[in-house]
């Protein structure tokens, strides 16, 4: 049987990144931010493209690695909104967006807590919601994300396996327990079709029916 870690490394290695994403990744590390893996970035680009999204919201901007990957998959004229509490992160992300050549009219960066910003966004106004933020807040962000989705819209939660802790029932930390509960709750939600991918540190997908 093939070693799953070998397959994981192979899949991650197939995801090529250009200098724009590489520089954004370097700035992430300088700021102490954990960017999405190359494999996750590639999946985000494909999901953005295949969803034909017109409006996207991201929770957890970081230094813009995931944002660049998402916007590159969007159709011309689609808009991207990203939320982060750290103004330095947003500054680094704006630099990445500028280097990628994205028009300022397509990208909106919002400083603030997601718990305060998301409730102000309109119901059923987004086609894609990407969450890559603090674990304690992720369940409530996911609830808001489902509210924001149009029919056919997609919710994507990064680090959904919490570095393999979620899959191991022996791990009883708050983050792992909370994510297990969130997975079950979304799985049982009759409004959603769900899937869990092992890409990166885990991607949980939920499509709004």
Image: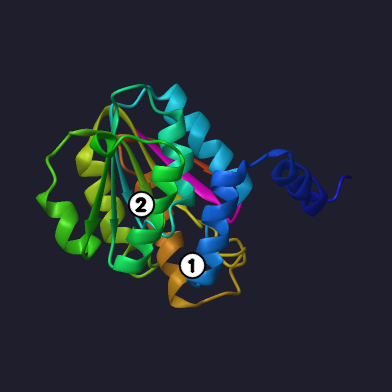
Please give the name of the residue rendered at 60% of the width and 65% of the height, measured from the top-left corner.
163
- Pick the front one: 12 or 158: 12
The reply, left or right, for residue 113 in relation to residue 51 is left
Please give the name of the residue rendered at 45% of the width and 25% of the height, measured from the top-left corner.
49
Colour scheme shown: rainbow
Which of the two marks, 1 or 2, is nearer to us in this view? 2
Please give the name of the residue rendered at 70% of the width and 46% of the height, measured from the top-left corner.
12
Q: Magenta segment range?
A: 198-207
The N terminus sits in image quarter: top right
Q: Which mark is residue 33?
A: 1
- Up the image or down, 99 lies above or below 141; here it is above
- Pick the front one: 2 or 128: 128
- Image coordinates of residue 31 in percent, x first then y, are 47, 71
Label 2: few (<14), some (14–19) or many (≥20) C-alpha neighbours in 10 Å: many
Please give the name of the residue rendered at 47% of the width and 31% of the height, measured from the top-left corner.
47
The reply, left or right, for residue 9 in relation to residue 79 is right
- Up the image or down, 117 lies above or below 127; here it is below
Res. 209 visible in picture: no
For mark 2, what is the residue?
94
Magenta span includes 200 = yes
Label 1: few (<14), some (14–19) or many (≥20) C-alpha neighbours in 10 Å: some
- Up the image or down, 77 lies above or below 178; here it is above
Q: Quadrant of residue 152?
A: top left
């Amino acid at each position: 049987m093939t070693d799953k870690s070998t397959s994981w490394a192979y899949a991650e290695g197939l995801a090529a990144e250009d200098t724009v994403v590489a520089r954004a990744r370097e700035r992430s590390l300088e700021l102490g931010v954990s960017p999405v893996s190359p494999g996750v970035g590639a999946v985000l680009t494909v999901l953005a493209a295949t969803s034909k999204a017109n409006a996207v919201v991201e929770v957890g901007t970081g230094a813009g690695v995931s944002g660049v990957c998402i916007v590159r998959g969007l159709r011309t004229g689609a808009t991207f909104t990203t939320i982060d509490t750290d103004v330095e992160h947003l500054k680094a992300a704006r630099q990445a967006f500028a280097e990628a050549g994205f028009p300022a009219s397509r990208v909106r960066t919002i400083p603030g807590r997601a718990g305060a910003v998301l409730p102000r966004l309109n119901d059923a106004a987004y086609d894609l919601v990407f969450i890559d933020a603090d674990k304690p807040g992720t369940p409530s962000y996911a609830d808001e994300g489902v509210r924001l989705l149009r029919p056919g819209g997609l919710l994507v939660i990064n680090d959904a396996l919490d570095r393999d802790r979620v899959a191991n029932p022996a791990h009883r930390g708050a983050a792992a327990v909370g994510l297990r509960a969130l997975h079950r709750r979304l799985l049982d939600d009759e409004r959603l079709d769900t899937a869990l991918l092992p890409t990166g540190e885990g991607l949980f997908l939920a499509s709004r029916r």
